[in-house]
Amino acid sequence: MELKANHTSLLAETATLTRTRSRLGTPSTLSCSPTGGSTFLHGPSLTIPRKKNGVLDDVRSNGWLDAMRSSSPTHKKISMDVGHGVASSEADAAYLTWLLEFPSALSSFEQITNCAKGKKIALFLDYDGTLSPIVDNPDRAYMSDKMRAAVKSVAEYFPTAIISGRSREKVHEFVGLTELHYAGSHGMDIIGPLRESVSDNHPNCIRSTDKKGKEVNLFQPAADFLPMIDEVRMLLVECIRDIKGAKIENNKFCVSVHYRNVDEENWDLVAQRVYDIMKDYPHLRLTHGRKVLEVRPVIDWDKGKAVTFLLESLGLNDDDDVLAIYIGDDRTDEDAFKVLSEVNKGFGILVSSAPKESNAVYSLCDPSEVMEFLKSLVAWKSNSLE
Ligand SMILES: O=P(O)(O)OC[C@H]1O[C@H](O[C@H]2O[C@H](CO)[C@@H](O)[C@H](O)[C@H]2O)[C@H](O)[C@@H](O)[C@@H]1O
């Protein structure tokens, strides 16, 4: 039996498994001001230390390898002892305990819609691991037609944006819906509605046209870095060429170094090769995703800033009656969760099937639960309009 069958009763069952509930608290205190979540632990420092004696000392001592090993917890669903409703392993018990701190957005749906009453919902969706399941080949991370239909329906009721680490063009191609707003390269490439106050406030925001010839605002705060990023991408392609399974992905303002398909014994080699290139580019930094190293410009911009920018572009940032919901699965999504709770404008929903520290308030287990959540939002909104 899967956890999804009945979150509430399972949570009650497992309450006895933990003595930490009172310490953790639950968003039942959320009322209509959804802030909270815990402080996100950013993990190992990502600054690059000077080179030491041995070749691999750098990547070991700076924590890259540890971060690589913990970057994508094994996907699992809770298995339960049939007929007993108790968690069948310590990992399951840990997950159920974690759910007390980050309750399912599905079982908390009524609480969420109570918060949303009388408010304008704006929806922000990450792509990989949120709308599409994680797969070995990043070029084939397609979302299902059912998911596409769910995203299309939700966008009919609420302004909806995709915020991805991929290039904007690529994620738009995968999603294939023109009615959404898109931010690629972790928010460093945004097309938003034309709004003069926004281009006045952001020097890198220019007037442009989208694929349909409609006038839009194009915001690319890292435009000056493009030649450097291209140069580093080409160096990275060369330097990992002989490592079986390693793959470089061009995300325009970022470069992804994938190691999902590399033998674990060669991960340190991937890390060291990337490190050896990065050390000559102090204006670039590295972040960790799910079995991916991401090289990006050192600028004060992330998915959190992209959410703020998009809210401004949608004319929603000054309204008190806005509820922004951000759904994502990755470390980079934490910046967005954090911003929403800081400005008290909404909350994050972390997609994870394993316990993680997060700035999110709620959780969903996997993309199938994300789809269920989107469909529930549509049903709730259309019923409320009848
Ligand atoms: O911000 P996102 O939309 O979540 O993008 C983050 C990265 O996602 C992709 O990589 C991840 O998904 C791949 C396909 O399932 C998987 O093979 C890979 O191991 C994951 O890290 C994408 O390929 C990256 O470029 C994005 O930065």
Image: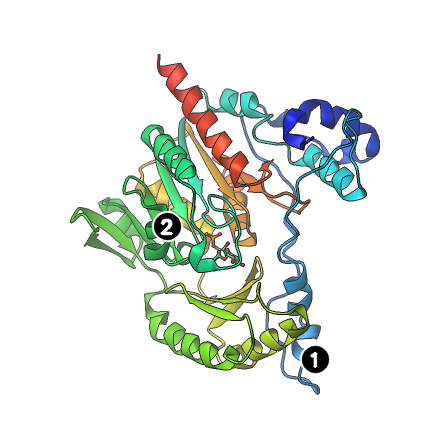
Q: Residue furthest bottom?
A: 53
Question: x, y (%) of residue 113?
Answer: 50, 22
The label number, if any, that marks residue 174 in the structure image: 2
For label 1, the crowd category at 10 Å Cα-Cα, with few meaning under 14, some 14 to 19 and many 20 or more, is few
Relative to 29, say whether 347 is above or below: below
Label 2 – label 1 distance at C-alpha = 39 Å
Q: Secondary structure at mark 1?
A: helix
Decide which of 287, 233 is in the foreground and name it. 233
Q: Disc 1, ligand 1: is the CB inside 8 Å?
A: no
Location of mark 1 (residue): 57
| Residue 146 in view, yes or no | yes
Task: Report the mark closest to the observer, 2 or 1.
Answer: 2
The residue shown at (49%, 59%) is 137
Q: Residue pushed farthest top? A: 386
Q: Is residue 156 above or below residue 379?
A: below
In the rendering, which numbered label is found on residue 205? none
217 left or right of 83 in image: left
Q: Is residue 2 left or right of residue 138?
A: right
Viewed as shown, does residue 289 lie left or right of 303? right
Secondary structure beneath label 2: helix
Identify which residue is drawn at 62% across, 58% down. 71
Location of residue 111 with respect to 127 vertically, above or below:
above
Residue type at the position of mark 2: Phe
**Which is more N-terminal, label 1 or label 2?**
1
Residue 145 placement: quadrant: top left
**Could you say which is closer to the camera, residue 215 or residue 230?**
230
Is residue 318 in view from this perspective? no
**Quadrant in the picture for the C terminus:** top left
Hey, what amino acid is under mark 1? Asp
Q: Residues within 10 Å of mark 2 (few under 14, many from 20)?
A: some
